[in-house]
Image (cartoon, rainbow, N blue to C red):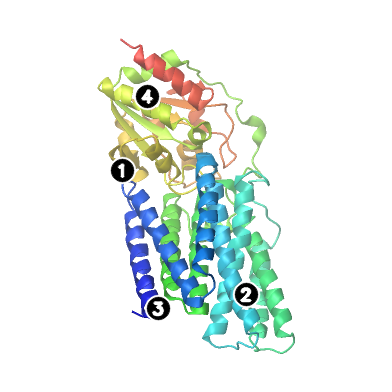
Amino acid sequence: MNLTVLVELTYLLSAILFVVGLKRLQSPATARAGNALAALAMLLAIIATMVDAEILSWTGILIGMAIGGVIGGIAARTVEMTSMPQLVGIFNGFGGGASALVAVAEFLSNPAIGAGTPGVTMLLGTLIGGVTFSGSFIAFAKLQELMTGNPITFPGQNGFNLVLLVVGLVIGATTLGAFGFLEPLTAFYIFCGISLLLGVLLVIPIGGADMPVVISLLNSYSGLAASAAGFVIGNMVLIISGALVGAAGLILTMLMCKGMNRSLANVAFGGFGGSAGVDRSQIGQRPVRKADPEAVAAELGYVNSVVIVPGYGMAVAQAQHELRKVGDLLEGRGVDVKYAIHPVAGRMPGHMNVLLAEADVSYDKLFDLDEINDDFGNTDAVLVVGANDVVNPAARDPGSVIAGMPILDVDRARRVIVMKRSLSPGFAGIDNDLFYMDNTLMFFGDAKESMADLVREVRELS
């Protein structure tokens, strides 16, 4: 078997593994295996490409694998679960940047590429990759609180972005020789700069509450950029894998927008998700009913049904393991325990599912918003752990900044217990009416420490 045939067979195997891996990502029970299959597919594709193009020797490939494995292993062990959205954002950025660099290298090797299909795909790869690269790092900065999480807007922003895009496309056409007012290489450098600037301008007006959608959308962009890079260099496995990532990311983005009852255009251009323009002086000023661990244990331990709603506060405190202990103890007392997962809880898609899976919470106990919302009216007690906007009844108020956003209807339960450090607002920057309702008890403190106290008190119940 000659080398060319072997490389093509390896690409075929890689493409199959990508499809199977993506298929297995649809269930938490098989997601880890699916991720491993996809990683293996990428490794095979990279090795086949390097061997076929004679870029590196086997020694160089092994050294690269060793260095990358060490970096990946350290990151996997040291990055906190609360920082996973930031890490995903960086991955998206690097993926988009790598695809853009492939297109840039192709152009620099052939500046007179012309206006044919290779030239157009080269520009698309550069544009999408550049937008993904800079946009992802703006998202990272917002999530890491290196810059404000509020929408950053200015008058005529959307119109300016549109004009900038049109100018970029004209410059791109000049790069391919359609117009002669700029030298192709100069035009291409300007085109690259516009692509990076567009990424910044498209993400800064999106607020913190929409970060899960942004992360998913940028993931889709990184896939499209990879697919475009595949067309540029004629690599079929890159085209297939990029198209899979792009399509999956876009489908997830649309599902999350549906979960928020908003359109993708509203997320991208609405400037939603920050506290700008909100009167913060009255937040947390109304009286609340406080509870201690003993009272909370009594509220949960002597009922028939409990629904637990995890949120980003649980992730910050790393309280998922103690939470599972509470759930197990309540089940041992005959209480029906369920977990309600809002589609945009946390800071990235599936954030809460990942945390609960890490704590070995059974998958069949996790219910999404549509499956469990009708049950709250018949639920004895709800334990909200660090969630805020996704349980805020203000979403039913047409005048609220989160009006129309589907929420978990926890306020309709007989008793609601909210675990939070304080009465501070969530990503949307508004007060939560749930905290002040007659059927709500506020259990203040660090979620992990408070949950440990609750474990002890539930154990001591008669």
**On the image, which quarter does residue 412 sit in?**
top left
Q: Position of residue 375 (x, y in %)?
A: 30, 35
Label 2 sits on residue: 104
Number of the label disc, if any, that sits on residue 397: none
Number of the label disc, if any, that sits on residue 3: 3
Q: Secondary structure at mark 2?
A: helix
Residues at marks 2 and 1, CA–CA distance in whole angstroms? 47 Å
Q: Amino acid at mark 1?
A: Glu
Residues at marks 4 and 2, CA–CA distance in whole angstroms? 54 Å
Q: Position of residue 335 (x, y in %)?
A: 28, 24
Q: Amino acid at mark 2?
A: Val
Q: Position of residue 442 (x, y in %)?
A: 49, 22
Residues at marks 3 and 1, CA–CA distance in whole angstroms? 53 Å
Q: Secondary structure at mark 1?
A: helix
Q: Where does the C terminus fall, quadrant-wise? A: top left
Question: Which residue sits at x=33%, y=67%?
Answer: 16
- Left or right: 407 as drawn, with respect to 146: left
Label 4 sits on residue: 326
Label 1 sits on residue: 371
N-terminal-most mark, 3 or 2: 3
Q: Where does the N terminus fall, quadrant-wise? A: bottom left
How many C-alpha atoms fall within 10 Å of the one at disc 3: few (<14), some, or many (≥20)?
A: few
